[in-house]
Amino acid sequence: MRNQRVTLQDIALLADVTKMTVSRFLRTPEKVSPETRERITKVMEEVGYPLEDAERPQKTPRIGILVPSFNNQIFSDLLAGIESVTSQQGYQTLVVNYEYSKEREEEHIINLLTYQLAGLILTDSVHTLKADKYLNAAAIPVAQVMDLDDTHGRIAVGFDNFQAGYDMATTLLASGKQHVVYFGSMSDARDKKRYQGYSQAMLERQLEPMHITPNKVSSVSIGAGMLALARQLYPQVNAVLCTNDDIAVGVLQECLKSGIKVPEEMAISGFHGLDIGLATTPLLASVITPRYEMGKVAAEIILKKIKNLPTIERVDLHYRISLGGTI
């Protein structure tokens, strides 16, 4: 009888291979060298780990998904798009949160790849060297969403964050405002690209880029505090470009509370077009991003790759600028 405490890590140690190699052997043994296959098979036989059970396909195939936060509508919309496809085609999703930590993302990527997943969807395109090594060796299709970086052969579904930051900054400047401050959040790769786009628009007009980045998850309360700080650091500020609508709503509330006229004295832009920005008065200006569609398209491509069907691997779903009533 099989010892229930025997794990893939135990087998890997006994066979002098990595846990990922054992996992690859169970999923696609033809991709493991004959010598390694023989060594792993021998260990499994010795510890009573039945190969017929290990190699038996799962009744319900699973797609792994990594998100940086469960407390953000951006990623709930993305997940809804993914599951609109996976649930209809008989796939389960295994969702893991890494709280914007590269180290935790690396750990979760390695752990997820030891499961018999059919595919993996990531919400970031910048990873640790170790995580990249594991992803490059993965024997399953991997998609990266929310951006369009060079993905080293992985599927990419998203939009140009640099251009989106540039376009919204240009829109604020075109409204007559010259002192535009960028409000960041976690300083992740997408946030940095938006800031770079904003900076390019400012520099083209011989204006100095100004920014505040708290390195905290975006929220309405943080936005209010950021405006107070910006007015101290940059007294001339008359426009704010926020990396998320949560922050922008906080800025708007603080303006209304302080008697600052919007948009006459302070223009405000958010990002993503979240529901919270649609409920404000005046209506919040924002960069509208296709989060549901990104999840849906990424899932569709992943499933086509799993079934060895022809498909494209890079999709730009674009964005649009909404002026609302705050510009």
Image (tube, rainbow, N blue to C red):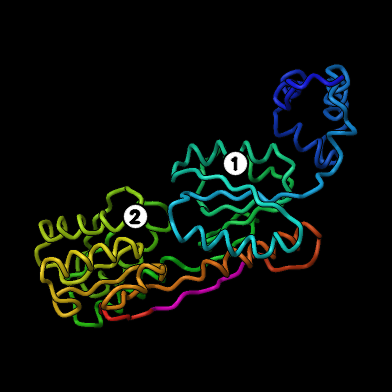
Residue 226 lies within the magenta run:
no
Estimate how packed mark 2 is, as few (under 14), some (14 to 19) or many (20 or more) residues with alpha carbons within 10 Å.
Answer: many
Q: Residue at x 55, y 73 (%)?
A: 317
Relative to 194, does residue 264 appear above or below in the rendering?
A: below
Q: Nearer the viewer, mark 2 or mark 1?
A: 2
Q: Residue at x 47, y 68 (%)?
A: 160
**Quadrant where the image shows the C terminus:** bottom left
Residue 244 position in % (x across, y down): 36, 62
**Quadrant where the image shows the N terminus:** top right
Q: At numbered mark 1, what does the secondary structure look like: helix, strand or loop?
A: helix
Of callouts 2 and 1, the N-terminal one: 1
How many marks are shown on the rendered structure? 2
Give the numbered dot on residue 109: 1
Kind of residue at disc 2: Ser
Q: At numbered mark 2, what does the secondary structure look like: helix, strand or loop?
A: loop
Residue 256 position in % (x across, y down): 16, 70
Relative to 266, does residue 111 appear above or below in the rendering?
A: above
Give the numbered dot on residue 325: none
- 70 vs 33, nearest the viewer: 70
Q: Which residue is mark 2?
A: 218
Looking at the image, residue 145 sits to the left or right of residue 243; the answer is: right
Circles 2, 1 touching at the beta carbon (< 8 Å): no
Q: Specify the segment rendered in magenta.
A: 314-321
Q: Residue at x 61, y 40 (%)?
A: 133
